[in-house]
Image (tube, rainbow, N blue to C red):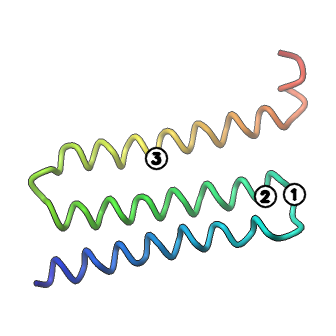
Amino acid sequence: MVMIILSNVCFTVGIVFWLWGTLPLVGKSSVLFKLHSLSVSDTLGSMAIIIGLLLRIPDKWPLLVLALISLAIWNTVLGYVLAYCSSDGGNHV
């Protein structure tokens, strides 16, 4: 029962992060700030949801841990690629 409650809390936190990341999209900030806010909040929200799934179905932990690691690496690399492409270094390719 406690694991289900903790899992539901993780799901809720994940959804809140997802929604929180969409708020800067309607603002007047720069595109890079919007992308950064969205990618960070989506990553944290997705990780919270995966942790909630890990609490709910612990027998699938190898796949869920792989999903967590892949999510962290993919979003970090994507952030560096976007930053490089927006700098002067991206114009000389």
Is 77 displayed left or right of 87 in the figure?
Answer: left
Q: Quadrant of residue 81?
A: top right
Mark drawn on residue 19:
none
Residue for point 51% across, 56% down = 43
Q: Disc 1 marks which residue?
A: 30
- Asked if marks 1 and 2 touch (Cβ < 8 Å), the reply is yes
Image coords of residue 29 (percent x, y)? 87, 64
Residue for point 61% across, 38% down = 78
Q: Amino acid at mark 3?
A: Ala
Earlier residue among tags 3 and 2 = 2
Q: Disc 3 marks which residue?
A: 72
Q: Quadrant of residue 85?
A: top right
Q: Amino acid at mark 1?
A: Ser
Residue for point 49% across, 62% down = 44
Element type where label 1 sits in the image: loop
Q: Quadrant of the C terminus?
A: top right
Mark 1 crowd level (few <14, some 14–19, many ≥20, 10 Å Cα): few
Question: Which label sits in the foreground, 3 or 1?
Answer: 1
Query: Alpha carbon of mark 3 to alpha carbon of mark 2: how far?
Result: 19 Å
Image coords of residue 51 (percent x, y)? 30, 63
Query: Alpha carbon of mark 3 to alpha carbon of mark 1: how far?
Result: 24 Å
Element type where label 2 sits in the image: helix
Is 64 displayed left or right of 92 in the figure?
Answer: left
Mark 3 crowd level (few <14, some 14–19, many ≥20, 10 Å Cα): some
Q: Disc 2 marks which residue?
A: 33
- Asked if marks 3 and 2 touch (Cβ < 8 Å), the reply is no
